[in-house]
Image: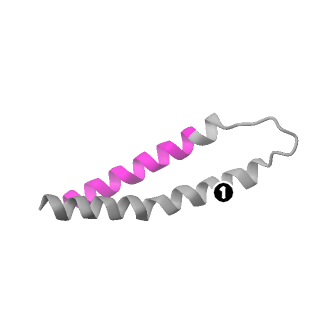
Amino acid sequence: MNFLWIFIFAIIITAIALIATLLLTKDSDAAYSGNKSISDQVWIYLASIPVLAIFAWIYWLVKN
């Protein structure tokens, strides 16, 4: 059950980080593509979820 809470916590932190990053990185450059940037960042954050889950799983194994 603890692993589930750690996983949920990791998802919440990742979502907050994504939103904060998107809000803080608004740029007014003429060559800037907001849609492309958002798409790239979403993939980066989604890819980080399994990495965080693996770290949480290793922590859970070590702790138990």
Q: Is residue 24 above or below residue 50?
A: above
**What quarter of the picture does the C terminus occupy?**
bottom left
Residue 30 lies in quadrant: top right
- Residue at image coords 33%, 58%: 7
Residue 17 in the image: x percent, y percent?
50, 43
Residue 8 in the image: x percent, y percent?
34, 54
Residue sitting at the far right: 30
61 relative position to 36: left or right: left
22 relative position to 26: left or right: left
32 relative position to 15: left or right: right
Q: Secondary structure at mark 1?
A: helix
Disc 1 marks which residue? 40
64 relative position to 44: left or right: left
- Residue at image coords 18%, 65%: 61
| 19 magenta-colored | yes
**What quarter of the picture does the N terminus occupy?**
bottom left
Q: Amino acid at mark 1?
A: Asp
Q: Residues within 10 Å of mark 1 (few under 14, many from 20)?
A: few
- Residue at image coords 57%, 58%: 44
Residue 6 lies in quadrant: bottom left
Q: What segment is highlighted magenta in the picture?
A: 1-20
